[in-house]
């Protein structure tokens, strides 16, 4: 069976097609980090209205990565998995729309996490985060877009999320435990550190 061609990758450089002219991974990561952070600072409800669905997540992603990728804000059209040994694939791309509708309906049924005590809030946030993370709707930039989305959800529920104490390895391990083994304890512990009561 022939290898699947990734339409997002420049076949000459082997890195994601981009608008900044980066031809190696480090240059792309540096540019992406700086430009996405600058866009994050100016993100408002005008760029991504709070619809609490895939459309909002797409709006967030489009705003954050508009300077880097011409496909920013557009759901992927290729199957992907985390680039770590043994990682399983995320949701097949053809199911993104349907699975997103189901996931955000579940969030709506939970009244967007409003009115919950802290333990319940943390537990349900871990559940909903895992559902959307498994969908992984974009070719790149899912984590950053999700953090903005869940920060918005937390804010309307009277809380906020502070990710500064969480390193990448801890985040990846917790997400994989939930998605691949249905072990939510690491993800719940992660959000127990991240969730801060609003003052």
Image: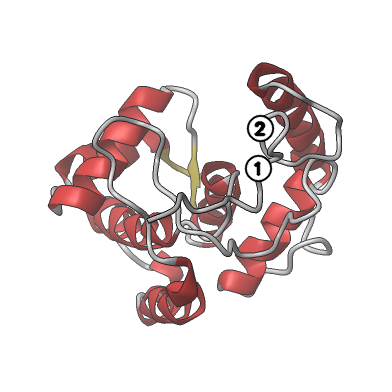
What residue sits 41% from the left and 22% below the top? 167
Label 2 sits on residue: 15
On residue 44, the disc is: none
Residue 169 picture quarter? top left
Residue 19 picture quarter? top right
What SS does tag 1 mark? loop
Task: Determine whether 15 is above or below 156 in the image.
Answer: above
Say if mark 1 contacts mark 2, CB within 8 Å.
yes
Label 1 sits on residue: 9
Image x and y of residue 6, in percent: 58, 50
Image x and y of residue 130, in percent: 33, 55
Q: Residue furthest front?
A: 1
What residue sits 72% from the left and 20% below the top? 30
Regarding residue 121, the answer to whether it shows in the image is yes
Q: CA distance from mark 1 to mark 2?
A: 5 Å
Colouring scheme applied when the structure was drawn: secondary structure
Image x and y of residue 160, in percent: 50, 45
Image x and y of residue 18, in percent: 78, 39
Label 1 crowd (10 A; few <14 / some 14-19 / many >=20): few
Which quadrant of the rendered structure holds the N terminus?
Answer: bottom left
Task: Determine whether 90 is above or below 14 in the image.
Answer: below
What SS does tag 2 mark? loop
Q: Nearer the viewer, residue 35 or 40?
A: 35
What is the tally of numbered marks visible in this picture? Answer: 2
Residue 194 picture quarter? top left
Label 2 crowd (10 A; few <14 / some 14-19 / many >=20): some
Q: Nearer the viewer, residue 21 or 153?
A: 21
Left or right position of 48 against 176: right
């Amino acid at each position: 069976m022939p290898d699947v061609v990734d339409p997002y990758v420049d076949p000459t450089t082997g890195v994601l097609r981009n608008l900044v002219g980066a031809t190696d991974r480090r240059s792309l990561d540096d540019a992406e980090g700086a430009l996405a952070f600058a866009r994050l600072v100016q993100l408002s409800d005008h760029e991504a209205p709070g619809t609490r669905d895939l459309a909002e997540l797409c709006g967030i992603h489009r705003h954050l990565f508009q300077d880097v990728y011409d496909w920013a804000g557009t759901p992927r059209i290729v199957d992907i998995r985390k680039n770590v040994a043994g990682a399983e694939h995320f949701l097949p791309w053809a199911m993104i729309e349907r699975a997103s509708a189901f996931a955000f309906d579940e969030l709506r049924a939970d009244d967007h996490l409003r009115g919950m005590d802290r333990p319940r809030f943390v537990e349900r946030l871990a559940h909903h985060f895992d559902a959307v993370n498994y969908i992984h709707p974009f070719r790149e930039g899912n984590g950053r877009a999700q953090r903005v989305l869940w920060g918005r959800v937390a804010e309307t529920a009277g809380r906020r999320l502070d990710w500064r104490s969480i390193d990448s390895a801890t985040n990846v391990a917790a997400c994989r435990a939930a998605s691949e083994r249905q072990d939510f304890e690491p993800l719940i512990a992660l959000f127990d550190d991240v969730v801060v009561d609003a003052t």
